[in-house]
Image (tube, rainbow, N blue to C red):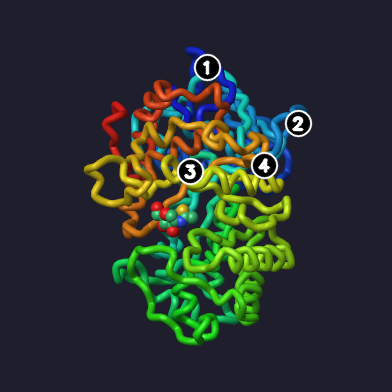
């Protein structure tokens, strides 16, 4: 069974097959270095399990048994991320208007082979075939994201890169890094080094902390960019700032630093909104991070500021919005920023309160849908889940994570204001890569489909069958996912 996740917008397969052979070549037409890179990426994914050489070649016509990649100007409706895939018994051709589309075409092609294709070890004796037919695929939403909380627990560069590869496999194009919280500051700021050196030394539960050097952050940004993923950095303020307050006395109202914090309570910390040094700090932090971030956005948090009076909150957010703009970025904040005056190029991220989200949308802000009860991957699957939280009033089984619709969920928001979907992994109880795998997968596969596939193409019964098959691919990729009883895993 051909089981592609996210399901393509249009596809038609027949009984014929195209098979890879030891003679297959991957042919790039044109001289785009980017397309060459995509072809090499595809070859590198197909080589280990098949054991085939799969040379990547340019400047020749594809022949029988080959896979070809080309940019084409003949189908502008494909947009920046869409693609076409044509498989005949002789050849497979991938076509797109822009490089990202070819990258997504190659992710689809990976998922058309037998699941063993994702195995890291050679699997001799298998027929590496794909069904013949056509795919024409364009994403529903431009924003298909995941947020990772590094504040509560820190994850090193290798874990993040592995996650980036898994996001790309599911056509997710945004990774939002929550880089600071009460429990830890996770990125070196050269002009305020104690943020990382002191504020980064702790994590929840007394577990080891850590932070990214600026070179490591740049490495993550570049690795993501090669996989068509934009990094959105978040520095949460004015609340969720205990690690910063503990690092610099001057940021505190009374000039006295609190101790570092390793609990999980929220809403007790606040920057000193009426001190000028606070805005020097904000300016320096945003300036240094913006300079390393090619993406258009900077996320300022702005959530759960229970110890910042509302008028101070409004004053602070409106000032910070100008600082973000000054450094050439568009501001994103959690939905609470809907209480302030927003410029129309600001984006609000919905997580709980629909009314305040609607206030942001009414000001022209774009909305990202991250409803906690559906899209928070730190929520327990059911009452036996040993890690995770449970505060939304329900559990979030695989079906709950899949079966919701952003337009219906955000009734008060005009559908055209919805930029897309972002799931979130908060890490109060998530410490190891195994914990991360278990909470993220397979829920993430469902969010990928909500973000990419047309609403009419989504259906739980179809999805659960495809997911059963997809589980074999995840296992081949070494993902220790949650084997929900809602799915008949193969
Ligand atoms: C709410 S959602 C938070 C986080 C917690 C999360 C736990 C949001 C903007 N804030 O601080 O980690 O719940 O699920």
Lower sequence index among marks 4 and 1: 1
| Secondary structure found at label 1 | strand
Q: Are marks 4 and 1 in contact (CB under 8 Å)?
A: no
Looking at the rendered image, the disc whose residue lies closer to the viewer, 3 or 4, is 3
Residue that numbered label 2 is attached to: 76
Residue at the location (30% across, 71% down)?
206
> For this rendering, which residue is in front, 250 or 19?
250
The quarter of the rendering in which ligand 1 is drawn is bottom left
Q: The C terminus lies in which quarter of the figure?
A: top left
Residue that numbered label 4 is attached to: 99
Residue at the location (72% across, 52% down)?
345
> For this rendering, which residue is in front, 486 or 55?
486
Characterize the local packing of mark 3: few (<14), some (14-19) or many (20 or more) Cα atoms within 10 angstroms: many
**How far apart in space, not on screen, are marks 3 and 4 (Cα)?**
31 Å
Lower sequence index among marks 3 and 2: 2
Looking at the rendered image, the disc whose residue lies closer to the viewer, 3 or 2, is 3
Lower sequence index among marks 2 and 4: 2
Lower sequence index among marks 1 and 2: 1
Residue that numbered label 1 is attached to: 13
Direction from residue 40 to residue 430 in the image, left or right: left
Residue 324: give x, y in percent of width and height. 68, 64
Residue 374: give x, y in percent of width and height. 43, 40
Characterize the local packing of mark 2: few (<14), some (14-19) or many (20 or more) Cα atoms within 10 angstroms: few
Residue 205: assigned label: none
Q: Are marks 1 and 2 in contact (CB under 8 Å)?
A: no
Lower sequence index among marks 3 and 4: 4
Q: Is residue 206 visible?
A: yes
Residue 179: give x, y in percent of width and height. 50, 64
| Secondary structure found at label 4 | helix
Residue 371: assigned label: 3
């Amino acid at each position: 069974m051909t089981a592609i996740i996210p399901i393509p917008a249009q596809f038609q397969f027949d009984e014929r097959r195209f098979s890879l052979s030891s003679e297959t070549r991957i042919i790039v037409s044109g001289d785009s270095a980017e397309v060459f890179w995509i072809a090499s990426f595809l070859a590198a994914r197909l080589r280990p399990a098949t054991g085939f050489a799969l040379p990547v070649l340019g400047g020749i016509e594809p022949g029988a048994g080959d896979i070809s990649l080309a940019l084409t100007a003949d189908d502008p409706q494909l947009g920046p991320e869409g693609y076409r895939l044509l498989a005949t018994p002789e050849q497979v051709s991938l076509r797109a208007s822009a490089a990202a589309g070819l990258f997504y075409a190659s992710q689809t092609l990976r998922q058309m082979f037998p699941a063993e294709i994702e195995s890291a070890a050679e699997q001799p004796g298998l027929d590496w075939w794909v069904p013949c037919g056509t795919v024409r695929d364009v994403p529903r939403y431009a924003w298909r994201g995941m947020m990772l909380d590094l504040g509560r627990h820190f994850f090193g560069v290798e874990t993040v890169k592995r996650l980036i590869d898994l996001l790309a496999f599911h056509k997710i194009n945004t990774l939002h890094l929550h880089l600071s919280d009460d429990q830890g500051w996770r990125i070196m700021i050269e002009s305020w080094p104690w943020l990382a050196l002191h504020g980064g030394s702790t994590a929840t539960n007394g577990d080891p902390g850590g932070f990214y050097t600026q070179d490591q952050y740049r490495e993550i940004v570049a690795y993501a960019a090669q996989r068509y993923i934009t990094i959105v950095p978040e520095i949460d303020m004015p609340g969720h700032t205990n690690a910063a307050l503990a690092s610099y006395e001057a940021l505190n109202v009374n000039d006295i630093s609190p101790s570092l914090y390793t609990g999980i309570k929220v809403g007790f910390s606040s920057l000193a909104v009426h001190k000028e040094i606070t805005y020097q700090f904000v300016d320096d932090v945003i300036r240094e991070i913006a300079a390393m971030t090619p993406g258009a956005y900077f996320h300022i948090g702005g959530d759960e500021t229970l110890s910042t009076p509302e008028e101070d909150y409004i004053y602070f957010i409106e000032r910070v919005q100008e600082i973000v703009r000054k450094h050439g970025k568009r501001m994103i904040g959690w939905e609470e920023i809907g209480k302030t005056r927003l410029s129309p190029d600001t984006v609000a991220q919905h997580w709980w309160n629909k009314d305040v989200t609607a206030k942001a949308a009414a000001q022209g802000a774009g909305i990202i849908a991250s409803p906690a009860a559906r899209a928070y991957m730190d929520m327990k699957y059911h009452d036996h889940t040993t890690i995770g939280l449970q505060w939304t009033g329900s559990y979030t089984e695989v079906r709950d994570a899949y079966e919701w619709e952003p337009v219906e969920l955000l009734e008060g928001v005009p559908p055209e204001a919805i930029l897309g979907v972002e799931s979130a992994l908060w890490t109060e109880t998530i410490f190891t890569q195994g914990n991360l795998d278990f909470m993220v997968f397979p829920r993430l596969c469902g969010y990928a489909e909500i973000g990419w596939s047309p609403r009419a193409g989504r259906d739980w019964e179809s999805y659960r069958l495809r997911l059963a098959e997809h589980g074999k691919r995840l296992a081949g990729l070494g993902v220790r996912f949650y084997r929900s009883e809602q799915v008949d895993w193969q």
